[in-house]
Image (spheres, rainbow, N blue to C red):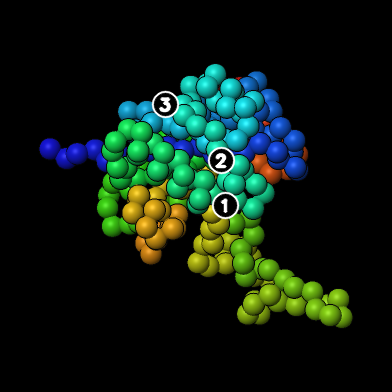
């Protein structure tokens, strides 16, 4: 019998957002932004050891508990600054849960609340890709809004120049190859040894989980928030 890997889901939500004040608890399509990620993770609980919220903010912690996340600690102050990296925050949570529960994890799943359109199906699909073996991590990606071959730079004279190799004039967007993708911030699923021993979310072999643009909104600005609200309202209306 194949043993199911032990996967710890960690949701990171720091207080003190400067671009969007109170972002993680701000109402989005009828419930706090954080709820969308907690709900998606909890729907996958059969595949997960636990769903843990790491935060330094009491209001975020209360919101997380209210929607079903476990908040077993408040994030240390040194990991709650503007310069604290996600890697150190996630490693702290892993150490805490492993010591408390007396078990070692196999995979770590980082879910950021700024990706509210990520679904249970997306998480399940990423886990399935990891279980195929042969990779250190599974990271979600989406199509780049514009292919890199069309990127331009402006020189010292203010003139437009190719950013890289010159592209034949008149090339159509659909003719640009190979397809180009960008990390969308929704899913980072990493082997425990890569995360804890190599200090990386990626490792040498990263498998891509491709998500469509309409589920890839990463909320950083007011525009992102409004776009997510429109997309969520549309998906709820058309269920």
Mark 1 surroundings within 10 Å by alpha-carbon count, few (fewer than 14), some (14 through 19), many (20 or more):
few
Mark 2 surroundings within 10 Å by alpha-carbon count, few (fewer than 14), some (14 through 19), many (20 or more):
few
- Determine if residue 227 is in view: no
Of the numbered discs in the image, which one, if any, rests on residue 76?
A: 2
Kindly report which numbered mark, 1 or 3, lies closer to the viewer in this rendering. Answer: 1
Task: Name which quarter of the figure residue 120 lies in.
Answer: top left
- Residue 231: where, in percent of width, then height? 64, 33
Of the numbered discs in the image, which one, if any, rests on residue 43?
A: 3
Of the numbered discs in the image, which one, if any, rests on residue 85?
A: 1
Task: Name which quarter of the figure residue 126 lies in.
Answer: top left
Q: In this orientation, which residue lies closer to the viewer: 93 or 186? A: 93
Callout 2: helix, strand or loop?
loop
Q: Sequence-wise, which precedes: disc 1 or disc 3?
A: 3
Q: How many marks?
A: 3
- Residue 76: where, in percent of width, then height? 56, 40
Residue name at image x 63 percent, y 22 percent = 31
Q: Residue furthest left?
A: 1
Which quarter shows the N terminus? top left
Q: Sequence-wise, which precedes: disc 1 or disc 2?
A: 2
Q: Are marks 1 and 2 in contact (CB under 8 Å)?
A: no
- Residue 109: where, in percent of width, then height? 42, 42
Callout 3: helix, strand or loop?
loop
């Amino acid at each position: 019998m194949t043993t199911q890997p032990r996967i710890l889901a960690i949701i990171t939500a720091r207080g003190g957002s400067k671009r969007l004040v109170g972002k993680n608890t701000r109402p989005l399509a009828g419930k706090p932004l954080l709820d969308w990620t907690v709900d998606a993770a909890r729907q996958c609980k059969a595949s997960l050891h636990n769903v843990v919220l790491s935060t330094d903010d009491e209001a975020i912690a209360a919101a997380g508990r209210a929607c079903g996340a476990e908040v077993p600690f408040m994030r240390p102050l040194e990991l709650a600054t503007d310069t604290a990296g996600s890697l150190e925050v996630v490693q702290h949570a892993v150490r805490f849960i492993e010591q408390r529960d007396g078990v070692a994890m196999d995979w770590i799943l980082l879910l950021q609340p700024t990706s509210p359109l990520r679904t249970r199906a997306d998480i399940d699909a990423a886990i399935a890709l990891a279980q195929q073996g042969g990779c250190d991590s599974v990271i979600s990606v989406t199509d780049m809004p514009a292919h890199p071959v069309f990127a331009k730079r402006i020189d010292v004279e203010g003139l437009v120049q190719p950013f890289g190799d010159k592209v034949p004039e008149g090339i159509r967007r659909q003719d640009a190859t190979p397809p180009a993708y960008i990390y969308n911030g929704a899913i980072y699923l990493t082997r425990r040894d890569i995360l804890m021993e190599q200090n990386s979310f990626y490792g040498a072999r990263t498998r891509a989980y491709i998500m469509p643009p309409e589920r890839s909104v990463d909320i950083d600005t007011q525009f992102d928030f409004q776009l997510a609200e429109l997309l969520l309202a549309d998906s709820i209306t058309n269920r």
